[in-house]
Image: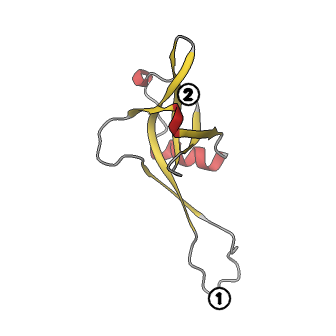
Amino acid sequence: MAIKIALLKSGEQVITDAKEILIEDKVCGFFFYKPHRVRLNRPMLLKEDEDVNPDSVEVTLSPWILLTEDERMAVATDWVVTMVEPIDDIKEMYLEKTNGKIDKDSGTD
């Protein structure tokens, strides 16, 4: 299992259990298992809220493609700008959202 945040060419950030698709030892794409879009929202602050950090953000996760029952999606390498390791809080949030389970038959390590 390799939980990563992928930055896509569209600008979307997707957290997923990612696995490379190999053809003759060459990476030609990725399988995204249970991908969720990462959205950053700035909370509205009232002037009286001095305890709230003005640089804080709220993070929400939602299924990447809402109108499908598929849990595994293939993504071409030319659509992935980069993949990074998520911070622990976001990884925990993702695991809670996906029930902390990565199915054995998902085809991921």
Mark 2 Cα-neighbour bin, 10 Å: few <14, some 14–19, many ≥20: few
Q: Which residue is mark 1?
A: 47
Q: Which of the colour schemes (rainbow, by chain, secondary structure, one colour) is used?
A: secondary structure
Image coordinates for residue 22, horizontal then vertical, percent: 52, 18
Which quarter of the rendered picture does the N terminus lie within?
A: top right
**Label 1 or label 2, whichever comes before in sequence order:** 2
Residue found at the far bottom of this picture: 48
Image point (68%, 75%), residue name: 54
Q: Which residue is mark 2?
A: 1
Please name whichever residue, 61 or 11, is drawn nearer the observer in this view of the structure.
Answer: 11
Circle 2: residue type: Met
Query: Where is 69 relative to 107, above or below?
Result: below
Image coordinates for residue 95, horizontal then vertical, percent: 52, 42
Query: Where is 44 relative to 80, above or below?
Result: below
Which quarter of the rendered picture does the C terminus lie within?
A: top right
Image point (66%, 45%), residue name: 88
Circle 1: residue type: Lys
